[in-house]
Amino acid sequence: MATREKIKLTSYNELLGVNNDMISEIDINKLHQFKDHPFSVVDNEKMLELAKSIENNGILSPLLVRPLGNGEYEIISGHRRKRACEIAGKEKVSAIIKDISHEEAIPLMVDANFQREDTLPSEKAKAYKMKMEALAHQGKSSDEMSSAKQIGQLAGISDRQVQRYIRLTELIRELSKLVDDKQITFVLGVEISFLKTEYQQLIYENICKGKKVSKDNVRMIRENQENLSLEEVRQILFADKTKVQKKICNVTLKENKLSEFFDSTYTKKEMEKVIYSLLKEWKKGKD
């Protein structure tokens, strides 16, 4: 078995460029799902077709696994093939064994699934995030942008799109499923991901009631959410548009005017806090 020092983690396709002498037959009950595997394995028509093919022709492409110890293995690539083998009644599976850590295996696991056509947005989101974190931890990328660029090149998308996908991991589970089911658009899902959990929950509950949510209104909340109550958020999202426009407006306070009241020790956030506090007191006086 190769030592870890000799392993060159270049690409999944290179790892599969092996001869038959490197392929082992492993008991199927010794194979375990990759920890936090982001991709679903579904018993659908395609799975049954794959199982039939394996039953007739065997596995044409071996699994890629890593040893866990005690004769057990973690699947890096081949979760669907393993499931198809179970359906086909196979007791052993052909696999390439690579002696690498779980963290080293993450980029390979993600890259192996780039070729799948039926990958859901939430699955891509989790996978890209896992790979980005793994690259950062291994010191293979200097910053988030270069990691996103590296991931995007292999996936055939821009670095900005990679970052948008990763934003989807900030959605509550219910909204993430709505993106997967195309009940809300990918772009709207990304915008909603910047909102607090309680606001996301509010959006989900109202979508379930048949109400529509606009990207512009979500962005309006995103830019002002630190100063809005839940009821104000509800009004912005679902009330009459003219009321919304009256609700939020931009006011610019000039620095030379503010310096009359705040000395140089105050930060922008501290000044905002004082101003909002005074405005609340003023509003109470009006009421």
Image (spheres, rainbow, N blue to C red):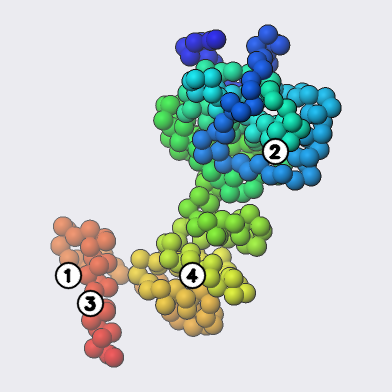
Is residue 108 visible in the rendered image? The answer is no
Residue 116: numbered disc: 2
How far is disc 2 from disc 4 in space, using C-alphas?
Answer: 34 Å
How far is disc 3 from disc 1 in space, using C-alphas?
Answer: 13 Å
Residue 69 falls left or right of residue 93: left
Amino acid tagged 4? Leu
Look at mark 4 in the image and give the residue it sits on: 202
Q: Position of residue 29 (x, y in %)?
A: 61, 28
Residue drawn 27% across and 90% down?
286
Classify mark 1: residues with Cα within 10 Å, few (<14), some (14-19) or many (20+). Answer: few
How far is disc 1 from disc 2 in space, using C-alphas?
Answer: 60 Å
Look at mark 3 in the image and give the residue it sits on: 278
| Badge 1 or badge 2: first in the primary sequence | 2
Q: How many marks?
A: 4
Judge whether 244 appears above or below 130 on screen: below
Task: Identify the image quadrant of residue 275.
Answer: bottom left
Amino acid tagged 3? Leu
Residue drawn 54% across and 23% down?
72
**Residue farthest toward the right in the current orientation of the protein:** 56
| Badge 3 or badge 2: first in the primary sequence | 2
For marks 1 and 4, give the one nearer the viewer: 4
Q: Position of residue 281 (x, y in %)?
A: 23, 81
Look at mark 1 in the image and give the residue it sits on: 261
Is residue 250 visible in the rendered image? The answer is yes
